[in-house]
Amino acid sequence: GIAEAEKKIAELRDVKSDPRELPETEQDYQVLSSGKPIFQAEGDTLRVWAPYIARKTCGEASGCHAGVKDGEVLGAVHMQFSLAQINRDLTRDAIMSAIGKTILALVIIVALIMMLHFVVIRSIQVIHAALKKFSGGDLSGRIKIGGKDEVQDLAQGINVFIDRFCEMLDQVKQEKRSAQENEERLKVVIDNAGEAIITTNAQGRIQSFNAA
């Protein structure tokens, strides 16, 4: 009986570990020493080294881990995942997002162009039509443009210029009317004078004379 027991003990001492259970890479050793997982992404592959840590109930539930301390690193698990589908989904989402942003930018550009046409270009067309009427001698109208921008300031400046021009034109007409009235009064005086009166211009030419 003793010899048989010694034989079994020797067999237990000669038990060899599975090569797959031995650490192979530097990451295996890092996880075993630190107890912290390691994540590495290479192309479409995600590799994970996760520590297998003993818990307080582990030794009580399993005889193979009997006597281990709570928190002790028992081993490291190496897992490998394919990220090909995830990368394809991310690429597709990025493309769709770029297309959506491009469409939104085009819509904004079209809206700005339409706004430019209806606000600025139409205002310029109104100013052009008014200036055409002014050049034809019609000074009765004024440019009416809403808003508070440079185009509205331009229209207001043109209106002020036309107002002042009309004032100057009225003043010239008034002065001309006064000159004509003065000339008529002077002519009456000359015609009723008892002596001969002759008027000449700057070149000495006779302009008028009375009947005396």
Image (cartoon, grey):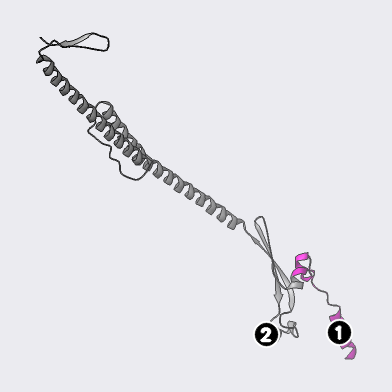
Above or below, comparing residue 142 to residue 95 in the picture = above
What's the amino acid at mark 2?
Answer: Thr
Q: Residue at x 39, y 44 (%)?
A: 111
| Stretch in magenta | 1-30
In front here: 128 or 61? 128
Q: Is residue 138 visible?
A: no
SS at badge 2: loop
Image quadrant assignment for residue 127: top left
* Mark closer to the chain start, 1 or 2: 1
Tag shown at residue 9: 1
Query: Where does label 2 land, which residue?
Result: 57
Q: CA distance from mark 1 to mark 2?
A: 29 Å
x, y (%) of residue 39? 68, 64
Q: Is residue 33 visible?
A: yes
Quarter in which the N terminus is drawn: bottom right
Q: Position of residue 140 (x, y in %)?
A: 22, 33
